Amino acid sequence: MVSAPSFLVSGNASIDEYYLVDRIPAADEAQEAKDFFAKLGGAATNVAVALSRLKARVTFAGVVGSDEYGDLIVRYLSEEGAATHCVVRSSKPTGKVVVILDNAGRRAMVAVRGANTDLKPGFIDADAMFKGVSHAHLSSTKPDYTRWVLAEAKKRGLSTSYDPGMAIASRGLEYVRDVLGLVDVLFVNAREYDALGGEALEKEYRGLLVVKEGEHGSRIPGLGLQVPAFRVSAVDTTGAGDSFNAAFLVAWKLGLPYEKCLAIANAAGAIKSTKLGAQSSPTLSELNRFLESRGHEPLVF
């Protein structure tokens, strides 16, 4: 048996407030919510929890407020098995995302960054972050912080990955250009791929570019690989890409062929999309049952 991979995950930590509606309201229109609930959110915390559920060892580094939501985030991460000694408290309120979710699983979101604005180079102790890990992953972090973390990771001989998210990708390739040389695996969805220049990104980026295409599956354009999606009845796609990232990274760190990495990641994203909440990623046993039911080998380590 191979030992479990170990990861540092860093980025925004927030609470997702869900409002369930029949349809997403247009401008100047009101909709009555049928239900409401709050769950841990933020792309990086989603990845951290997803990795932990897949039996990886995880340290999370981020900033939360000294408030009830901050307490909730730290407690939840700890209960999921992630180390939280690199979660720093801020005087600002914990970040929050309001998610309006309709019957078809479509969503509209409004984010309040709050304490996440303190996530800057040097704010968290680098030696503490990297102790005992072999890979650093960042999600939706701005270039200055991303560059600092990944440079520190490379100094220590770690592999790295980055998912910029649409807020960063929408600013174009130039905005992230000097970060790309520090990234071993770059995750983008189809919209982010286009926003970063598409083929121009492929020509410039020398690492492993992984493109997530939802119901159309995923691909690694530099290798000419494309793997179809698994057909499921989706109820909430929030966090599906983060579940994908986690499963891909575990499979990749275990040295599996790229095509298998994509298939395993597609499965994790598909399972998550059948459940409400960004933190609904599958456990390793759930993932393996799904893979075997679809004729694929389980993820074993």
Image (spheres, rainbow, N blue to C red):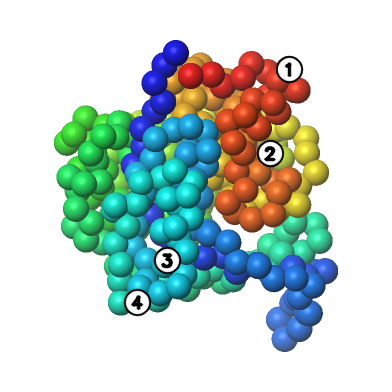
What count of labels does the image hold? 4
In front: label 4 or label 3: 3
Residue 178 shows up from this direction: no
Q: Nearer the viewer, residue 3 or 271?
A: 3
19 on left or right of 209: right
Could you tell me how far apart the alpha carbons at marks 1 and 2 are, in whole angstroms?
Answer: 15 Å
- Secondary element under disc 1, as helix, strand or loop, is loop
Could you tell me how far apart the alpha carbons at marks 1 and 4 are, in whole angstroms?
Answer: 49 Å
Q: Nearer the viewer, residue 148 or 223?
A: 148
- Which residue in the structure is indicated by mark 2? 270
Query: Quick check: marks 1 and 2 in contact, CB under 8 Å?
Result: no
Residue type beneath disc 3:
Asp
Q: Which mark is residue 71?
A: 3
Q: Position of residue 276 (x, y in %)?
A: 69, 54
Residue type beneath disc 4:
Lys
Say which quadrant the N terminus sits in. Answer: top left
Q: Which mark is residue 272?
A: none
- Which residue in the structure is indicated by mark 4? 92
